[in-house]
Image (cartoon, rainbow, N blue to C red):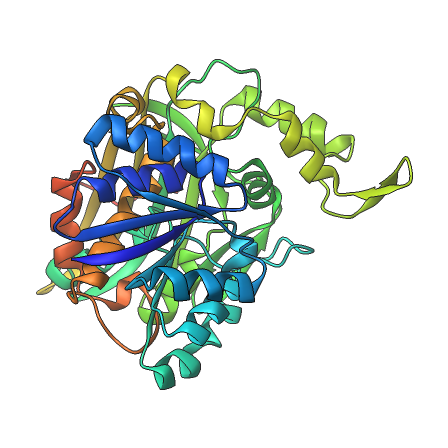
Amino acid sequence: MSKVLVIGAGGVGSVAVHKMAQLPKVFSSITLASRRESSCLKIAKSVKERFGVQIKTAEVDADEVDQTVRLLEQVKPALLVNLALPYQDLALMDACLKSGVPYLDTANYEPRDEAKFEYRWQWEYQNRFEEAGLMALLGSGFDPGVTNVFTAWLIKHHFDRVDTLDILDCNGGDHGHPFATNFNPEINIREVTAPARHWENGDWSETPALFQKQSFSFPEVGDRNMYLMYHEELESLVKHFPEIKRARFWMTFGDAYLQHLEVLQNVGLTSIEPIYYEGKEIIPLQFLKALLPDPGGLGERTKGKTCIGNIVTGEKNGNFSTKYLFNVCDHEECYNEVGSQAVSYTTGVPAMIGAALMVQGIWKGRGVFNMEQLDPDPFMDMLNTHGLPWKLRNLETPLAF
């Protein structure tokens, strides 16, 4: 039984603490902290009503290392679970080092002034965490996170050699808004509008954002258009599995979403360059975020399913095969269980699982780890028992594109 401190009271933070509350033998005490404690109190009320578990709340500015250190010293957790913004990863890692507390997050660090997705900044903490005898687990969400574990599990059990990896992310849900993002709008739009990159024959190949489109029939969702993008798990996967010849990431978008996004780009509202408005400096994308629907409030009106998984080709005992490992998640079922839509659910549940494996000592080590570096089997087992069951299919042929 362990105390945990969760920082971040958005949709993912809400799911994670709801799921932690269902495992009182693992998480004996849960403290949820955010810049506004009022957000934490709303989540605590829901957890109490749904599961009868009382969680503690606190207020903290995650950008301020000393504030986080004081909170860590007060709570004395076995783990800090960072579900705040990716901008705050390094500050929270610094706080953990100062306090002697292990660390977990769901997305790699991003600088505020540049849409750049790299693990470099966090990997540079390797020696500091190793010397401190602490573990930092990076990217324990779905993608990154589950997709990393899917890859490691397939390599462990089904392949001696992997040639190609394609990660396919489909949200087939409908929330009824003309335009909204399913997670933090600022992070979502930065990600979607960044140049696409994929790994091929030992190097990165870059193309314009949303330039390459393919159609795919997703299980329980149907045919959808998906677009080549860059996602951070590609960087760690090709580092730790250098035999992979080609690695790509695809995400689905509806035509209406892309039309709105194009207009917003054309008028400058997706820019992260500061401008002056009525004597004040503002970031257009942050202003746009304030105008858009809160992703945490989409659950009640979102219907449909997500389907996220990996298609891997390679060889086992001289036999070539293509495997498709995936999860399908229902928005309405997620809302009925924890009050959130499936995009938050598919990130919050893996955050809880990663935390559970760390505090129980099932996943342990000194230094900074990506998900694929650890034994995938206990994580895969917990996916099946905590709301994200997976399926494995043999495909007759590799992807035709």
The furthest residue to the right? 279
Give the answer, above or below, for where 260 lies relative to 98: above
Q: Position of residue 160 (x, y in %)?
A: 16, 66
Nearest the viewer among 28 and 366 is 28
Q: Residue at x 53, y 70 (%)?
A: 121
Nearest the viewer among 316 and 324 is 324
Q: Position of residue 80 (x, y in %)?
A: 36, 60
The furthest residue to the front? 74
Nearest the viewer among 216 and 112 is 112
Give the answer, above or below, for where 136 lies relative to 181: below
Quarter the N terminus occupies: bottom left
Quarter the C terminus occupies: top left
Q: Position of residue 175 (x, y in %)?
A: 44, 18
Q: Position of residue 97 (x, y in %)?
A: 43, 75
Nearest the viewer among 17 and 251 is 17
Is residue 152 something one can see in this rendering? yes
Give the answer, above or below, for where 241 lies relative to 282: below
The furthest residue to the bottom? 131
How many numbered discs, if any? 0
Is residue 391 something one can see in this rendering? no
User: Residue 344, located in which quarter of the rendered image?
Assistant: top left
User: Residue 112, located in which quarter of the rendered image?
Assistant: bottom right
State left or right for residue 271 relative to residue 22.
Answer: right
